[in-house]
Amino acid sequence: MNKFSKIKQHIYLKIESGEWPENHPVSSENALSTQFSVSRMTARRALQELADEGLVIRTQGSGTYVAPIKSQTSFMAIRNIADEVRSRGHGYRAKVHLLKEQPATVQIAEALELEEGSPVFHSLITHYENDQPVQLEERFVNPKLVPDYLKQDYSKVTPHEYLCVVSPLTEASHQIEAILPVSTICQYLNIDRHEPCLRILRRTWSSGGVVTFATLTHPGSRFKLGGHLTFKE
Amino acid sequence: MNKFSKIKQHIYLKIESGEWPENHPVSSENALSTQFSVSRMTARRALQELADEGLVIRTQGSGTYVAPIKSQTSFMAIRNIADEVRSRGHGYRAKVHLLKEQPATVQIAEALELEEGSPVFHSLITHYENDQPVQLEERFVNPKLVPDYLKQDYSKVTPHEYLCVVSPLTEASHQIEAILPVSTICQYLNIDRHEPCLRILRRTWSSGGVVTFATLTHPGSRFKLGGHLTFKE
DNA sequence: TAGTGGTCTAGACCACTTT
DNA sequence: AAGTGGTCTAGACCACTAT
């Protein structure tokens, strides 16, 4: 492993474990270069990359500090609904309505780049925040890339979490739109049919091809999508 | 200006102008270091940052190349509605409903980080795609940072374009939600009051502070927000 | 004034691709 | 074999912050 990667990992563990909380000072470039027996440029690279990733904040003349949580969530990062709910300090649970194999319709086959009628995995899950539905997740998965998808318990681990582990994603495309819900969605989300919904369509790729196609529907009254961008220079 | 910034700008201009199209080779680190009389490390930094920004792609042993357009548009980049409409090959026009100075309400003062009642600039503009309204843009601008905001003709240059020129942005925050339109919005967008709308709230900063607070409302039936992400490593 | 991060240099060796 | 990018070194000077 590269020297700068080792240093990054060392700092990453301190932050992850909670040993270094928000705003805790991070070892200086000079301190790291002696501690790890590398040049200052190498220690610098480690800190610079952590700063680019939003984990630490560097201030000239002062030092490097663990970033406050809010600036760690990069803009529109692929979010995990469970983490998001928990980060707000709220209770999270999920209900699995459907989890089975079925033949692909034309649209699904196209989205997953498979043949029409070939088997695909299909799941339908409602995610709750403090017992209020906040997301209806309908997902189609390529069985060749994730053969054990149907064997998981999605009331414990979200599909997103499971897919991230078994099939590291390399690419994702999104589409966001506002819709009025059809009656079945109203039932799953427990909303009125006049309540607008925010809908996110997402396709994700791994090195093996299209992994999954998901439709995430959120009640407009209970969900807002936020983000923050910082431009360098 | 920094040496690496000069090199970045040089390459940026080549790409922007179209002189270097997609996949066109970019000068190598060694070539740049002799051309600009800098060390290879400095030339390297310029290329590395351009790669981080998605403008070029670097391949070990081969070289650095202008990135294909699809990977250049970073997800949810600050878009200009006029460019977006024109990029679809459609006709674009705008209608200015309101453009004046007025005292800030509590909410606006808070968003712009000004005192309540202090003067702010206010504009309300409908943007059309092929004579169909696609966005209602309500914008409040900090008059200290953009004193000539009211003097522009926004049927020719969008506020976004003007603001980008006079006040380069350093930061932006967004919120996206689905709403049902109130009656005034229905009129401006020529939609039914049951049609859901996608609403984007955006605050942008320059080095001088909060520049502008904008509310962009899109008819759900005529607008979708798209994005594509590629992950490194 | 001492310590920090920001920029930059002039080398070096390596892994990889192209020819 | 020549050229490219990837990593790394051991210095240097500067701008800024803290004390």
Image (cartoon, coloured by chain):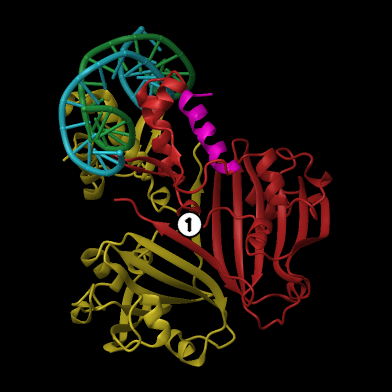
Chain colours: A yellow, B red, C cyan, D green
Asked if residue B11 lies in the magenta stretch, the reply is: yes
Extent of the magenta region: B1-17
In the rendered image, the quadrant that contains the N terminus of chain B is: top right
Task: Examine the rendering and report whether any part of residue A60 can be seen.
Answer: no
In the rendered image of this protein, does residue B165 appear above or below residue A94?
above
Which residue: 54% across, 42% down? B15
Q: Quadrant of residue C14?
A: top left
Question: A87 or A111, which lies in front?
Answer: A111
Task: Examine the rendering and report whether any part of residue A35 can be seen.
Answer: yes
Q: Quadrant of residue B187?
A: bottom right
Residue bearing mark 1: B70
Asked if residue B195 lies in the magenta stretch, the reply is: no
> For the stretch drawn in magenta, what is the main secondary structure?
helix
Which residue: 26% across, 45% down? A15
Locate residue A24 relative to residue B186 in the image: left or right: left
The amino acid type, in three-letter code, at marker 1 is Lys
Provide residue A210's location: percent of width, then percent of height: 33, 70
Locate residue B176 relative to residue B189 in the image: left or right: left
Question: A140 or A104, which lies in front?
Answer: A104
Question: B98 or A177, which lies in front?
Answer: A177
In the rendered image of this protein, does residue B199 appear above or below residue A33?
below
Q: Residues within 10 Å of mark 1 (few under 14, many from 20)?
A: few
Question: B116 or A84, which lies in front?
Answer: A84
Provide residue B32's location: percent of width, then percent of height: 43, 26
In the rendered image of this protein, does residue B217 appear above or below residue A9?
below
Provide residue A96's location: percent of width, then percent of height: 30, 84
Badge 1 element: helix
Please report, as a chain letter, where disc 1 is located. B
